[in-house]
Image (cartoon, rainbow, N blue to C red):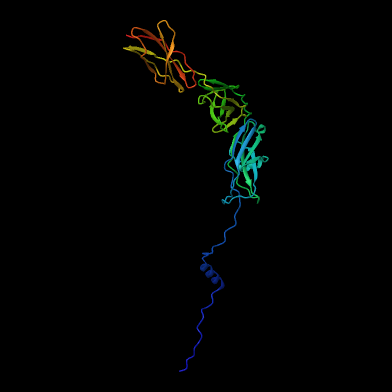
Amino acid sequence: MLRILLPAARPPALPAIELIAAALLLSGCGYIGSPLPPLANIPAPVTDLAAVQRDARIIVHFKLPTTTTENVTIKSALRLDLRIGTSAEGTFRAGEWVKQAKSVPPGDLQGGVATYAIPSAEWTGKNVIIAARVIGANGKESNWSALEALPVVPPPEKPAKPRIENTAEGLRLTWEGPPADYRIYRRAGDEKFFSPVADVQQPTWTDRTSEFGTHYTYIVQRIVKLGVHKEAESDQSEEASETPIDRFPPAAPAGLRASAAAGSIELSWDRNPEPDLAGYRVYRAVLGGAFEKIAELSQVPSYSDRAVESGKQYRYVIRAFDKSANESGQSAVVEATVP
């Protein structure tokens, strides 16, 4: 029988797109999805705008956003748009405010923080609304920040430089001014910055936390309350400084008692309350003689005098002294006779 050998059949050719897909799968590139939409590149809005009236200026500051609304880092410079205006009585309409609000010239920009000082005279007696936005290099604008409402009042009067008096209770500050709200700021020792330490309603205050030997600097500011979480500030006073020195002796010991026993006279008294108390000194006199110091003690308020003679009468007083070597006045005199 005659057999005819035919060439083996070839598989049908794959379309080109299937070949490409197969190659990508073999190379590990994975699934091919739809192309991503282009980025909007719109700056994120300002989120931390704050405003306060200080003397005859409205101080506004905020941080510049660093990313877009898609959380992509902004690498080019931003333009700032800060506006101030008033709102009609009744329902607030943001669109109307934007149209009538005034643009404020660029302020100071340091470390990514923008600061503006707007003269307040034009807005005195009005409730102003302030907002900011930023504009990217591509011309796209962020949304407006939250609106900051602020009542504007006549400039609060700046307090005079405070006077400082060194007292046993602490450094006492006084300054010229009527009864009003004041804020005191303090810088202690090597501190670089002032911190608020007290709000008072009279032009005087005593710093009861001051410590002897530490240098303190103070400034005072007038505050005008404008409602919940709103206030206007004066300019700050000139600085006043003092290093308190302990020139204040403890109080004279009280309650001194004496009881005679065989070969001794036992003394006891009430403990002094001063925090810097160092101890006590015991003074004794024989009948008709002058007082002489016979002992210097720690803070324990008792003493046993064993250097006595039978039949003699003795008189005693106690004095307290502090860590700065200030000595108190003497206690009441007590007498005892050794049996």
Q: Where residue 158 sits: x, y (%)? A: 62, 26
Camera-side residue of 94 and 61: 61
Report which quarter residue 272 is drawn in: top left
Give above or below for 7 relative to 116.
below
Q: Where residue 210 sits: x, y (%)? A: 52, 26
Please give left or right for residue 289 compared with residue 339 in the image: right
Please give left or right for residue 130 compared with residue 30 in the image: right
Residue 87 visible in rendering? no
* Quadrant position of the C terminus in the picture: top left
Q: Where residue 21 sits: x, y (%)? A: 53, 69
View extreme (top): residue: 288
Camera-side residue of 57 and 99: 57
Camera-side residue of 149 and 302: 302
Report which quarter residue 193 is drawn in: top right
Q: Say how many tags the image has.
A: 0
Camera-side residue of 283 and 21: 283
Residue 232 visible in rendering? yes
Identified at 63% across, 34% down, the residue is 58
Q: Where residue 115 sits: x, y (%)? A: 63, 38
View extreme (bottom): residue: 1
* Quadrant position of the N terminus in the picture: bottom left
View extreme (right): residue: 105
